[in-house]
Image (cartoon, grey):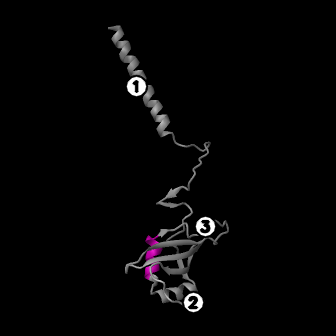
Amino acid sequence: MDKEILKRSLLKFAAVLLIIYVGIKFYDKPTANKAISTPFPIVVNKEPVSAPNRFPKKVIFSKHARCRMDCRKIDSVEVDEILRAGKINFKKSDTTTTEICKKRYAIEGITHDNQQVRIIIAPCKEKLTVITVIDLDTDWECSCK
């Protein structure tokens, strides 16, 4: 009977040790003393942390953007649709600069009238400037300078 109690105690002890090991191995939270390095940018809402504010207080359209929108039959409502729901194309964006207000983001999506559109924006603090608007499906003739 003593051997049976000893076996059960050892099994319980081993089980507790296993649970502690698994908890440390898989659920260890990083602390302030640990350096975290990742080979890729940290992603929030499927976009890197450096993503622009998509809900600025003020949206400004450059003269060039207004001209391109007019040529390409894209209105400000469609630009707003892309701004809010489009995906950032980091290959077409220029986010390498460290200067404030110099980053450029290319945001792409499909409007309610099925135009595939790319907008180039320049966020700066509480405002956002739309630099240009591109219809990715149709090559419209435009004379914006």
Q: Are marks 1 and 3 in contact (CB under 8 Å)?
A: no
Compare marks 1 and 3 and give the one earlier in the sequence: 1
In the image, farthest residue toward the left: 1
Q: Name the magenta segment's main secondary structure.
A: helix
Q: Is residue 129 left or right of residue 87?
A: right
Q: Which residue is mark 3?
A: 95
Magenta part of the protein: which range? 77-86
Number of the label disc, if any, that sits on residue 15: 1
Quadrant where the C terminus sits is: bottom right
In percent of the image, x 45 and y 82: which residue is there?
Answer: 138
Residue type pointed to by label 3:
Thr
Q: Position of residue 73 (x, y in %)?
A: 45, 87
Q: Position of residue 121 (x, y in %)?
A: 55, 75
Q: Which residue is mark 2?
A: 144
Compare marks 2 and 1 and give the one earlier in the sequence: 1
In this view of the protein, which residue sits in the foreground, 55 or 11?
A: 11
Q: Quadrant of residue 98?
A: bottom right
Q: Is residue 57 left or right of residue 103?
A: left
Q: Position of residue 26 (x, y in %)?
A: 47, 38
